[in-house]
Amino acid sequence: MTAPTTPVPLGGPRFQTDPAQLYREMRREHGAVTPVVLDGDVPAWLVLGYRELHQVTGDPALFSRDSGLWNQWDRIPDDWPLLPMIGRKQPSILYTVGERHRERAAMISDALEAADPFELRADAEKFADELIDAFGSRGEADVVSDYAMLLPVRVLARLYGFTDEQGPGLVTALNDMIDGRERAIAGQTHLATSMAQLLADRRAEPADDVVSRMLADRGGFSDEEIAQDLMVMMAAGHQPTADWIGNSLRLMLTDDRFAASLFGGRSSVADAMNEVLWEDTPTQNVAGRWAARDTRLGGRRIRAGDLLLLGLQGANSDPQVRTDGSLTGGNSAHFSFGHGEHRCPFPAQEIAEVIARTGIEVVLDRLPDIDLAVPAESLTRRPSPWLRGLTELPARFTPVPAL
């Protein structure tokens, strides 16, 4: 018996309200590789199986990152809403393949790895305290908009080499780009202009920062390539880390297992963060890979040029590898950071974890009696099949003075 082939629309309210059940239904009705349609009825495959996703991400020759292979380009209009995510000629590392990709990834990893972890945590604490100082006296706040969505980019901007005065403008630009509305173009322009100016400044006067280290790399990368990679890194580091903070705090505020952490303890923070990466990962689905030739995957016939979407959350919850639920806890074999040579660089993962954990711990230290200001069931997520995060997290607490 073959699985049904009627494709599933990759969109709609269920990705907001109950994606876990939706992934279970997809797997039950279609198998580990599910046919889906994107905006404009564009076909693709969503890889939900843990083993299948491991195969796709571990074989870059067969499942390429080269979007030029796509067999649907003749159907894609110039105003297709997913073009920023799936572009034909993307100059960033996301779509570089082969040896050049490995050289580019090494440049980025080396530049990030050289960051001092103690300075990174100190910066994260500094900006976290400043954000709490801004609302602490009110005794209430939206932890998403007042805190989580403001913290990661401030830390990353300092890491890059931007001045603290430039940080708020970069926060606004990144969040405008994420909103995707009329301010998105202005946000993208501000980010690109700021990055180009920073590169010019660091070429003239190098410093101990990520941008200077990338410019000093001997791989022969152009300023445009470096600027593109820096913008990709900032965008990819900001929103998922903000959602990691928000999703983890939601779990800690609504699940009795983590209640002890809200009274001065920190032992459960890491457990909550890891559980989120397994059960409620900020990056749900990723585009993508393209089949370099005809092949078979999960019982499906994949044509050359077919687009495969990486179902990270679906794979994390695959019952074939979660038979007893033991893969959570301290296990980090989830797909939340990807897999293979195109995965999130290890130093970037470590930086995101430091920012997120520090952000959560500062909240618990400064606001020890923090609690939800609304019923847990009323909390809503953004309606996106790609990134999963809260639209708001209203909280109340005993007012605290600024430091």
Image: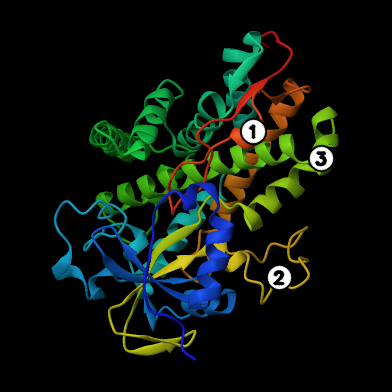
Specify the amino acid type for callout 1: Gly
Residue highlighted by disc 2: 322
The answer to whether residue 336 shows anywhere in this view is no
Residue at 55% from the left image edge and 41% from the top image edge: 243
Place of residue 114 in the rendered image (x, y in percent of width and height, measured from the top left):
56, 49
In this rendering, the answer to whether 171 lies above or below 323 is above
Rendered residue at 50%/64% (across/down) = 343
Image position of 64 with respect to 148: above or below:
below
Please report contact status of discs 1 and 2: CB closer than 8 Å, yes or no: no
The amino acid on which the numbered mark 3 sits, given as a three-letter code, is Asp
In the figure, is residue 350 to the left or right of 9? right
Q: Secondary structure at mark 3?
A: helix
Do labels 3 and 2 touch, CB within 8 Å?
Answer: no
Residue 115 falls left or right of residue 173: right
Residue 227, visible in the rendered structure: yes
Q: Residues within 10 Å of mark 3 (few under 14, many from 20)?
A: few
Q: Going from the N terminus, do you reach mark 1 or mark 2 first? A: 2
Q: CA distance from mark 1 to mark 2?
A: 30 Å
Residue 325 place in picture, x, y as percent: 76, 65
> Dot 1 corresponds to which residue?
359
Q: Residue 334: horizontal and vertical position, in percent?
A: 63, 64
Q: Secondary structure at mark 2?
A: loop
The percent coordinates of residue 55 (x first, y second) are 51, 80
Pointer 1 or 3: first along the chain: 3
In space, the residues marked 1 and 3 are separated at their CA atoms by 21 Å
Q: Which mark, by number, is residue 256?
A: 3
Of labels 1 and 2, the one closer to you? 2
Q: How is the image coloured?
A: rainbow
Mark 1: secondary structure: helix
**Image check: 369 left or right of 134?**
right
**Residue at the spot x=43%, y=48% of the render?**
384
Looking at the image, residue 62 lies above or below residue 331: below
